[in-house]
Amino acid sequence: MLRMKKLLPLILTVSLPIAVLAGCGTANKNASAGNNASSGSNSQSSGSSPAQPTEFSFYFTGSQNVKELWDTLIPMFEKQTPDVKVKPVYVPSGTGAQSSYDRILAAKQAGKGSGGIDLFSDDLSTITKGQKDDLWETLSTGAIPNLDKMDPQTMKDVSNLAIPYRSSAVILAYNGDKVKTAPNTLDELYDWIRQHPGKFAYNDPSTGGSGDSFVQTAIYKFLPPESIHNTDPSIEKDWDKGFSLLKELGPYVYGKGIYPKKNQGTLDLLISGEVDMIPAWSDMALEQIDKGQLPKSTKLKQLNPGFNGGPAYLIVPKLSDKKEAVKKFLNFVLTPEAQSVIVEKMHGFPGIQLSSMPANVQEAFKGVSSGFRSFNIGDLSKDMYQRWQSEIAVK
């Protein structure tokens, strides 16, 4: 059961906006003839062998905590649904999620179905690429009834091609004993950095999402709001003001321009007391506070406008021949029971609306349900990293 006695006081102390993720739905209890053939008929003659469960392959990537989440949820599902078996294929973070996408695309082009990948987990950019290549199944409540527990707008944002089953956001993490009045806006944050030299740090943006978010937020501060969804390289000519700001802030950050590697690098500086404020992923910070790795004085806060964040998505290849079994699993993932495990294991925001969650979880997130921003600049991030390295990292 949830460690809510520990988690509730923690979450209630943060002023952290959550994007409550969502979708729509109704029930369809009819399995397709193709799935019945693969999983075996339920009506058996006397003396016949029991029907074999339908097994599908689930490819996912992420850190070790993501693997531990699925190691918990998959057995729960299989116990409740004995006619379906999940074959998890874990692709460690940074070692080749692109290869899974390439395999699905190559299989389609060769007329070989989905390449043995029946369920796939990745980010928004993968959904966008796959939409252009017509790779993904359109999802509906007819086959996944629990989609009606989600906010329809969130599903609309991805054209019903994926399920945002959990989420997290980049926020400010700071030492509440040292910082009595935390910034509320980006301008206030930049002023705080200037007024407290050496006490703020962000990581090299190419090594972790929290530093990436800090850099992107600064660059797109000077552009129209809709620009954070623009993947056209022509927009790069408008990045100059943002890079000038980052260069100007350089002498005021930790070590007069030292940028740690990875998200944990800046968290370590906050833990040691070398800095008083950093951008951090909400789930990482919440987990480390819960485990006592970050001091109890650590507080979390989102800015207005906020840093970026976003969901983790589950995607079904259109050419999979195990879709009916996969959709049973997706329906399970969207139950309050499974979503409560996500809150406990991942310290993440639930994918379904809070009104569908248990009362203790609703109370934990009460008053912190406004949205963060989702950036999607596609491959432009590579150019952003290169320019940051040449103009900001090099003193």
Image (spheres, rainbow, N blue to C red):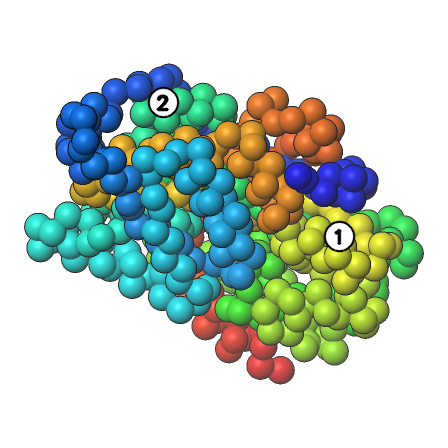
Tell me if residue 236 can be seen. Answer: no
Residue 154 shown left or right of residue 111 in the figure: right
Quarter assignment of residue 380? bottom left
Q: Residues within 10 Å of mark 2 (few under 14, many from 20)?
A: some
Residue 188 placement (x, y as % from top left): 76, 50
Nearer the observer, 352 or 310? 352
Label 2 is placed on what type of residue? Thr
Task: State the residue position of label 2.
Answer: 141
Nearer the observer, 54 or 268? 54
| Numbered label attached to residue 16 | none
Tell me if residue 83 can be seen. Answer: yes
Which structural element holds mark 1?
A: helix
Relative to 105, residue 348 above or below: above
| Numbered label attached to residue 290 | 1
Quarter of the rendering occupied by the N terminus = top right
Nearer the observer, 209 or 375? 209
What is the distance, in whole Å, between disc 2 and disc 1 at their CAs? 36 Å
Which structural element holds mark 2?
A: loop
The residue depicted at 39 percent of the width and 43 percent of the height is 314
The residue depicted at 68 percent of the width and 31 percent of the height is 361
Quarter of the rendering occupied by the C terminus = bottom right
Label 1 is placed on what type of residue? Asp
Most distant residue in the left direction: 111
Q: How many marks?
A: 2
